[in-house]
Amino acid sequence: MLKHAITVLLLAFSLFYFPFCICTSLAAPAPVPATGQTSCYNTAGSEIPCSGTGQDGDLQVGVVWPDPRFTDNGNGTITDNLTGLVWLKDADCFGSKPWLEATFAADALASGACGLSDGSTAGQWHLPRRRELKSLVNRGQVNNSYWLDTQGFTNVGIMYWSSSSLLLDVNDYYGWKVFIFDGIMRIENKANSFLVWPVRGGPGVVWPDPRFTDNGNGTITDNLTGLIWLKNTNCTDSAGGVDKNSGSLSWANALTWSNNLTSGLCGLTDGSTAGQWRLPNVDELESLIDTWLATDASPLDRSFSNLQRSEYWSSSTYLPLRNNSFYVSMLVGEVDFNSKDSNYYVWPVRSVSSVISVVPGSKDFGSVGIGSSSGQVITISNPSRPDNLSVYSLGIDGPDINMFLLDTGDGSNGSCGPMPIIAGGGGCTVTVYFVPLASGVKTAVLNIASSAPAAPLKSMALTGNGVDLTTSSLILTMAGTGNGVVYSDPVGLYCTDGTCLAEFVPWTTVVLQPVPDNDSTFELWSQECNGSAGCSLLMSANRYVTANFNQAPKARVDAVGYDTLTAAYTGSTTGAEILAREVEFQEDWLLNRDIVVAFKGGFNAAFSTNTGFYTTLAGSLTIGNGSLSIENLLIK
């Protein structure tokens, strides 16, 4: 519904997205905050259950508001904890003024005027841009002006001038006004008078270049907000039983159609399913406006297809008249409302579905000698599909940042590189090194900023203990049911039982060798050694190792051990081989099953080689049924 008769209207171009910023030490896009709407309403304006409607109050997408939303600074200013902007507490200090006078009044504001005692000087305040003013609107309120009064502001009115003008308006007649009462945004002749509400802060988030990325699958990613939009802004395919052949739809049908959009429709090949797309809320749709110029060379025209110079529905109900909903005009960028029975165009959006996973979740490097280093490989992955995960920044922060080093690699051989894009189901690695420069416990944090909507900033705690080593201790524990010896090269450790300790010169490489006795096998190392062969340790810190020896069985069939020949025979099937060690069995062995088995004796404890000696049976051997072949068995 165009409320102004202007032949050529072009929006003011801005290099900044106002006002929201995730203010961290790591760069990230500017995601759209939630609108504040939490309830849902049907076409008649009656409140209904939200679940499954796809309305703004159902999904409540966007950055969650902090609590408290506003902080009174006690000096005539109030800080918005969502945007970081600082507002004049008195929202009607200047009265109504024409646009140019409003601009001058805001620029000249200083401490001592309008109840200010903040020490501010002329030039620090400015007339807010239209999106800065819009950021104060809670679309979950019937009367937003009253709500702002309850948040600590005073004298909040209805209509305010913004500093935003229309581009290529040669006579500079028109600017933007914002209805703080309900969030409407309209163009207005600058000669008319509206209220003035100065603000400090900004200038906002610099737009990425390019602003939009064509994903080649029927979708466009807004690199500023992180939202994914349908490339075809006026698709006429049917979805969810809604015929969209005419292009425009009623509000209820627009919701249904958007909720049921899937890959395979509207040129989509992104693998998306029903329920992932939605009708955008009013602030998501409005976030596109500052990039738009009403020419065929505009960023939207260059990136999207079939853009209509008309109104597009949002999923947000207009609460003062609940049978109405907000729309955004793509002709001049106005935000207004109309009856839900009206027919407007539909431009679905979806959030990035990527998820960031970091393994391990934290890392304790243990004790590391001063001047040495210990490394840990960190895996960053995106287990969700279909969207890519963009990692905007990787960095280490914290009190001991100079003792933890990050190697991102160059993006080859599975390494992440400095700013990786990780496909759904994929991953990459970085390495963190602890390099203590002083003794004591040291801490830092690995920060990862990404496009993951649920957790854009992932933090991993890093700890380590720097030690000043004069000697390095090797502590070895013998474990298991068997016996053996572990010795070191160079000489220093010879352990047969319990826990043994040996001291070595720091930075020495020590090789440990396990030797089981005749009745045992060496199974594996644990703690700081692994595997079942010799273990090499760099003594850059105290080292802790466990050696596991197990008692070997007397006989074995396949991988199963037995302590008697009778038990081994019982566990055999036809064609089995009973292997026996070079030991004596004291039993009478009866074979009474119709099976064919083979006996082979004289094996070592690992059953890997024949010793050249015999297995002894101190008892009788009776074959009552079946057959038995024998090698290396001595019967006494």
Image (tube, rainbow, N blue to C red):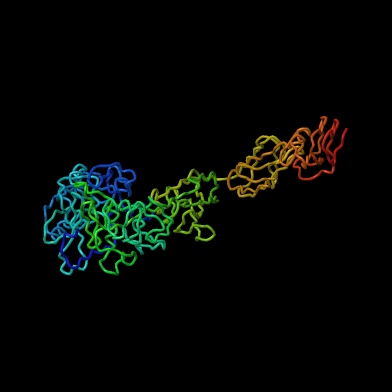
Establish if 538 lies above or below 292.
above
32 or 340, nearer to the observer: 340
Which x, y percent locates residue 445? 44, 48
Establish if 463 lies above or below 563.
below
Residue 228 vs residue 514: left or right?
left
Residue 354 vs residue 101: left or right?
right
Which x, y percent locates residue 89? 19, 47
Q: Quadrant of residue 163?
A: bottom left
33 or 128, nearer to the observer: 33
Q: Is residue 29 visible?
A: no
Q: Quadrant of residue 49?
A: top left
Quadrant (top left/top right/bottom left/bottom right) for the C terminus: top right
490 or 543, nearer to the observer: 543
Quadrant (top left/top right/bottom left/bottom right) for the N terminus: bottom left
Residue 411 vs residue 546: left or right?
left
Which x, y percent locates residue 319? 21, 46
